[in-house]
Image (cartoon, rainbow, N blue to C red):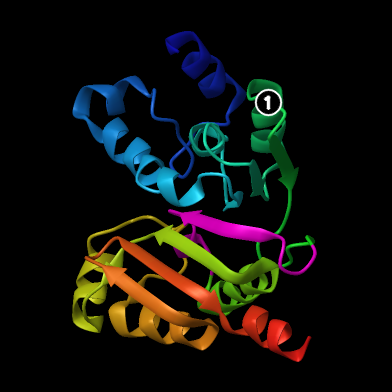
């Protein structure tokens, strides 16, 4: 794994906003376990399902999910990351594609579960709504989304967070109210767990399409 990590660093695919659990620093600090747990915690949900990992980065999350999923698809806007993933994770039930999260080109209702891990904060508020709208369009009537991102309890705490962060790639940090508003626009059920995780189920557009049929 260290050899693979060194290669990734040399190619420039590893950076402030993209990394892997086998980063030696993360292994030493224990942060690798946090990264892996994000995906392992949803394996049961993904079992025998068609799963989309939106913003899949270097594909290691898809590699975890594919062990139980019927099909695991990873999309990312970075061609280099997708090329690496395609060449690394060679399994029959895995697919990687370069794709804009605000314009997901898959057909309506084909996914059972969509994962959005540490991704939403890299989109503006407007693009976040576009992204969730596209996810809803491609989820089935009983579809579920699970995501992780920092969710600030209040606007004041968000401002303090931004003052203490120099991360220019985080384009929007959601408050709890903003996240609840976003999810309730598109899903009949949602839940925010602590300050780092959200889940929502029963996409409104998908179920409306089912009723019309």
Location of residue 131 by image quarter: bottom right
Q: Is residue 31 above or below residue 97?
A: above
Q: What is the x, y in percent for residue 140?
A: 65, 68
* Furthest-top residue in this view: 3
What segment carries the magenta color?
107-123
| Number of dots carrying numbers | 1
Q: Quadrant of the N terminus?
A: top left
In depth, the one of 35 and 140 nearer the eye is 140
Q: What is the x, y in percent for residue 169?
A: 47, 56
In depth, the one of 139 and 134 nearer the eye is 139
Q: Is residue 145 above or below residue 130?
A: above
Q: Quadrant of the C terminus?
A: bottom right
Local crowd at mark 1 within 10 Å, few (<14), some, or many (≥20)? Answer: few
Location of residue 146 by image quarter: bottom left
Circle 1 SS class: loop
113 relative to 194 in the view: left or right: right
Residue at 71% from the left image edge and 59% from the top image edge: 100
Residue wearing tag 1: 91
Q: Is residue 92 above or below residue 116?
A: above
Q: Is residue 187 magenta?
A: no
Residue at 20% from the left image edge and 81% from the top image edge: 156
Q: What is the x, y in percent for residue 145?
A: 49, 64
Q: What is the x, y in percent for residue 20?
A: 44, 31
174 relative to 9 in the view: left or right: left
């Amino acid at each position: 794994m260290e050899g693979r990590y060194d290669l990734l660093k040399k190619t420039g695919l590893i950076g402030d906003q993209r990394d892997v659990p086998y980063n030696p620093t993360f292994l030493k600090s224990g942060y690798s376990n946090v990264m892996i747990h994000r995906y392992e915690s949803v394996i049961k949900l993904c079992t025998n399902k068609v799963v989309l990992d939106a913003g899949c980065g270097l594909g290691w999350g898809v590699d975890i999910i594919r062990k139980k999923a019927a099909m695991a698809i990873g999309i990312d806007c970075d061609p280099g990351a997708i090329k690496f993933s395609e060449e690394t994770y060679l399994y029959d039930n895995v697919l990687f594609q370069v794709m804009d999260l605000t314009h997901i080109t898959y057909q309506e209702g084909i996914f059972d579960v969509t994962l959005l891990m540490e991704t939403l904060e890299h989109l503006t508020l407007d693009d976040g709504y576009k992204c969730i709208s596209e996810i809803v369009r491609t989820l089935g009537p009983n579809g579920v989304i699970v995501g992780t991102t920092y969710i600030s309890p209040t606007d004041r705490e968000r401002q303090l967070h931004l003052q203490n962060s120099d991360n220019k790639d985080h384009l929007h940090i959601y408050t709890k109210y903003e996240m609840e508003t976003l999810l309730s626009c598109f899903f009949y059920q949602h839940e925010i767990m602590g300050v780092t995780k959200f889940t929502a189920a029963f996409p409104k557009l998908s179920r409306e399409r089912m009723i019309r049929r």
